[in-house]
Amino acid sequence: MTADDSFGRLDDDDYPACTMGRAAEMLNTTQGFLRAIGKARLITPLRSEGGHRRYSRYQLRIAARARELVDQGTPIEAACRIVILEDQLEEAQRINAEHHRTAKRRPN
């Protein structure tokens, strides 16, 4: 992949463009928090060729939601489970809405 290809992917929510240090800085948290939510299997960052963690924008949004819950006093394991369930619910609602749109387009 060339540098031009990488710049083109920065708009991709799943592109692992952010280092752990930068992710922690952007979320105003610690690298330990990112490791903890990784250990709780909330997010699994991709690894660079050198073994360094890389986070996508989607993963940063998930981590930010977990941090919000932890800041409100929710234990980290519970916060991770809540975020996972919220994400699953959002996906199920998206799929359901798509099914409804498809059903409306079908002739009776």
Image (cartoon, helix red, strand yellow):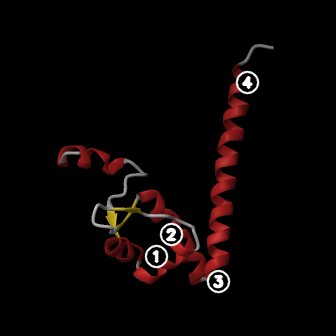
* For residue 82, side relative to residue 71 (left or right): right
Which amino acid, mark 4? Lys
Rendered location of residue 33, percent (x, y): 48, 80
Give the distance between the C-alpha atoms of the residues marked 3 and 4, in whole angstroms.
43 Å
Tag 3: Cα neighbours inside 10 Å, few (<14), some, or many (≥20)? few
Name the element at disc 1.
helix
Tag 2: Cα neighbours inside 10 Å, few (<14), some, or many (≥20)? many
Give the distance between the C-alpha atoms of the residues marked 2 and 4, in whole angstroms.
37 Å
Of circles 1 and 4, which is in front?
A: 1
Name the element at disc 3.
loop
Name the element at disc 4.
helix
* For residue 63, side relative to residue 73 (left or right): left
For marks 3 and 4 on the same chain, the one whose residue lies earlier in the sequence: 3
Q: Residue at x 71, y 32 (%)?
A: 99
Q: Pointer 4: what residue?
A: 104
Q: Pointer 1: what residue?
A: 34
Q: Pointer 3: what residue?
A: 75
Residue found at the very far left of the displayed protein: 3
Tag 4: Cα neighbours inside 10 Å, few (<14), some, or many (≥20)? few
* For residue 48, side relative to residue 33 (left or right): left
Q: Pointer 2: what residue?
A: 63
For marks 2 and 4 on the same chain, the one whose residue lies earlier in the sequence: 2
Q: From what the image shows, is residue 108 above or below residue 51?
A: above
Query: Are dots 1 and 2 in contact, CB under 8 Å?
Result: yes
Of circles 2 and 4, which is in front?
A: 2
Name the element at disc 2.
helix
For marks 1 and 2 on the same chain, the one whose residue lies earlier in the sequence: 1
User: Which quarter of the image is occupied by the N terminus?
Assistant: top left
